[in-house]
Image: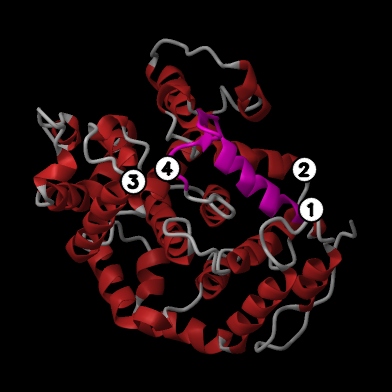
Amino acid sequence: MTRISGFNNASTTSPPYWMLVGINSLNEEEMVAIDRDVLLQTATEIYQNFSQDREKIKDSGLEKILFGASTAEQDGLKIERELEQWREQTPPIAAFTDLFIERFDYDKNNPKVRSMQMIAVLASVDHHNAYHNSPHFLNAFIDANRVATALGFSKEERFDFVYQMLRHDIGHAGHIGNIIDGEWSPLCEEANTMNVVIPYERVLGVDDVYIKYQNALTAATDISGGDRSYGMFIDKQFRYVFHGAEKPEMPKAFKTYFEDYAEDKVFLRLAKAVQVADIAASFSRGDGFNRQIACALMQEMEENGLDSQPLSTQKSQIGFLQFFEDYIFFEEGIESLYRQPYDSLIGELEKCPEKVFNCPKQRSASLQTLRHS
């Protein structure tokens, strides 16, 4: 594999030369899940209107909300209104990412920064996926910036955080739970993400140490397997390191990702923030957005025959929500950002037909655990 360095083109209407060379340097085996022609077409379409899209974001005022110092709850509503107004003409994630890189003065010749730009293009490819698609990546990008501001992250921490939120679900098929051939398997979807993204990172010159760090953060987003998941281990380790809780035993399989970072406070805090942004991206835009989410969740459960099980046992997107009350509201800044939209979503879910949220003979207790006491 040839690593790409140097080369900048002045054109703002075509992809950067280094990006094109990087894409064309990968062989077919390395281009997991994304066809070369589709990727090149996506990149070309993004950069045809790149300057206009950047200006569109600036004119909307979103740039100041995302990259400024505000952590107001109402910012989520402002973001929702702007995105709703744009509808099918929402600027691509790559345009938001470019403004982010510019706002925080990251070196555009740095391999990690180039890789972030490449990943933003990968995130714009239509994966025909109901959950892990361009809107989810954009929402995760937005929430990463809001959480980074709320928690006072440094410039370097913010970069690592945003990089991960662009990266974390590319290639993730969006299956209900981590199920392979009927058996639960930890990290099967998150591992897919790594397989898709790593060849691009390497061809652009990102070092293996940083790739390993980002892989560990990607693993932290695996929370759908309950106590057996990588994400739940991170939560327990976080409580041990920061709050003196009982030290959890690290399963042997987890050491691949976490052995080097188990006592690293910067990593653990960032991993928790990654979990926040991943889940919050599903409900943080406000009441209108939450009504759409509630309807989508209801439809998913009906289509998959899940309406006769307690929500707490379902392998479903709604399963993520049960973590939020105790698992995600871990710092005051997070509470102030997400309490109102979280309660709004729970209110919308409670309006859904009873058959979705009831067991055959008794009401599920799950909404009681979701509801703020």
Q: Is residue 269 above or below residue 346?
A: above
Q: Earlier in the sequence, mark 4 or mark 2?
A: 4
CB under 8 Å between discs 1 and 3: no
Circle 2 Cα neighbour tier, 10 Å, few/some/many (<14 / 14–19 / ≥20): few
Distance of label 1 from label 3 (alpha carbons): 39 Å
Distance of label 4 from label 1 (alpha carbons): 31 Å
Q: Is residue 101 above or below residue 82?
A: above
For the residue pair 315 and 320, the one nearer the viewer reads as 315
Q: Earlier in the sequence, mark 1 or mark 3?
A: 1
Q: Is residue 338 above or below residue 87?
A: above
Query: On residue 176, which mark appears?
Result: 4
Look at the numbered disc 2 and give the secondary structure of its residue: helix
Look at the numbered disc 4 and give the secondary structure of its residue: loop
Which three-letter amino acid code belongs to the residue tagged 1? Arg
Q: Which residue is mark 2?
A: 208
CB under 8 Å between discs 2 and 1: yes
Please identify, in this view, whether the residue under mark 3 or under mark 4 is nearer the observer: 3
For the residue pair 154 and 341, the one nearer the viewer reads as 341
Which three-letter amino acid code belongs to the residue tagged 4? Ile
Q: Which residue is mark 1?
A: 202
Look at the numbered disc 3 and give the secondary structure of its residue: loop
Q: Position of residue 112 (x, y in %)?
A: 69, 56
Q: Which residue is mark 3?
A: 304
Find the magenta span and give its range: 175-199
Which three-letter amino acid code belongs to the residue tagged 3? Asn
Which three-letter amino acid code belongs to the residue tagged 2? Asp
The answer, for residue 278, to whether it is visible in the render is: yes
**Residue 46 drawn in magenta:** no
Q: Residue at x 63, y 22 (%)?
A: 253
**Where is residue 70, by image quadrant?**
bottom left
